[in-house]
Amino acid sequence: MEVEKSGESNNKSKNNRDKKMTRKEILEKKKKVQEIIKAAVSQKDPFSSFPTFRHYKKKDLSVYLDSGCGDCLSSPVKQYIQNLLKVNMEASYGTEWPVEEKVKRREMVSSEARYIFVYEISNVDANIMLKLSKKGRCNADGMDDKGHLVAFVHYRFTIEEEIPVLYVYELQLEHRVQGKGLGKFLMVLIELIAQKSKMSAVVLTVQKANMIAMNFYRNKLRYLISTMSPSQMGLQTNYELLCKSFDYEAKAGLQGGEDK
């Protein structure tokens, strides 16, 4: 009850702020947000700002990270993404999966899609991997050269509630590399990319039936149920929208009354 009341209060505050803004100010604000998104999209290689995140090593896991774009995916990588999505997500979606799978296949090859690919490099020299990646960051081809893909993140820069956000479409790891801190490592990188790109928040969707993912985001990473989530509007759906905000406007517009 308190969450709903706080959410209503924040919406009223937002409406009051909007009423006080002149038409010129509103247009200028929209233009600024669009420019932020455009600048973020133009940055093709996130690792240029965070080179230490190219590698992750823990106990029996050693991986190398590279970036990519949806319209530059090779056939082997497309197939890998489709297979991993099916393995990881079919059970959570249940009878909705056949329709959802078609949607995800369209989303994954969009020019707006940005990727972080995770390659296992237990038998590959890290320096060689670095040289290979520099030959063409946007092209994720050459799985045999780069090693075996074990995980990926699909994200986009977009606008929610007039706020620039990084939206995580997918965070998928093979079962054998789960529970080793890799998922948290990838989300820390995502949050750094978001803040570096002047995004006000990270937003993502989680199936309610996926209790492992819900616990991961809610309890380990401290993501909050967004005011945009259907449950906050009194709607019954199989998913929740979660968010982590980085500034006051995003907290007021996306988080509502739920506090950390």
Image (tube, rainbow, N blue to C red):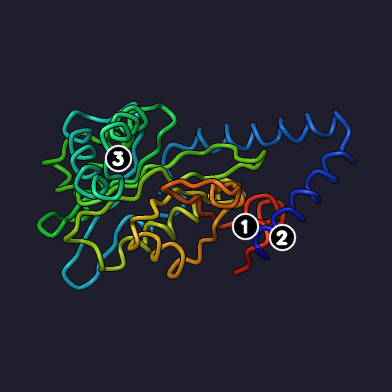
Q: In which quadrant is the N terminus drawn?
A: bottom right
Residue assigned mark 3: 134
Q: In which quadrant is the C terminus drawn?
A: bottom right
Give percent across and percent down for residue 31.
Answer: 71, 30
Task: Please name the amino acid that badge 3 sits on.
Answer: Lys
| Left or right placement of residue 160 versus residue 77 in this view | right
User: Any mark on residue 6, and which?
Assistant: 2
Q: Nearer the viewer, residue 22 or 232?
A: 232
Disc nearer the start of the sequence (3/2): 2
89 over 113 or under it: above or below = below
47 over 139 or under it: above or below = below
User: Any mark on residue 246, and which?
Assistant: 1
**Alpha-carbon distance for marks 2 and 1?**
19 Å
Task: Please name the amino acid that badge 1 sits on.
Answer: Phe
**Alpha-carbon distance for marks 3 and 2?**
49 Å
Q: Nearer the viewer, mark 3 or mark 2?
A: 2
Task: Please name the amino acid that badge 2 sits on.
Answer: Ser
Give percent across and percent down for residue 98.
Answer: 26, 33
Residue at the spot 55% in from the left edge and 48% down from the top edge:
229
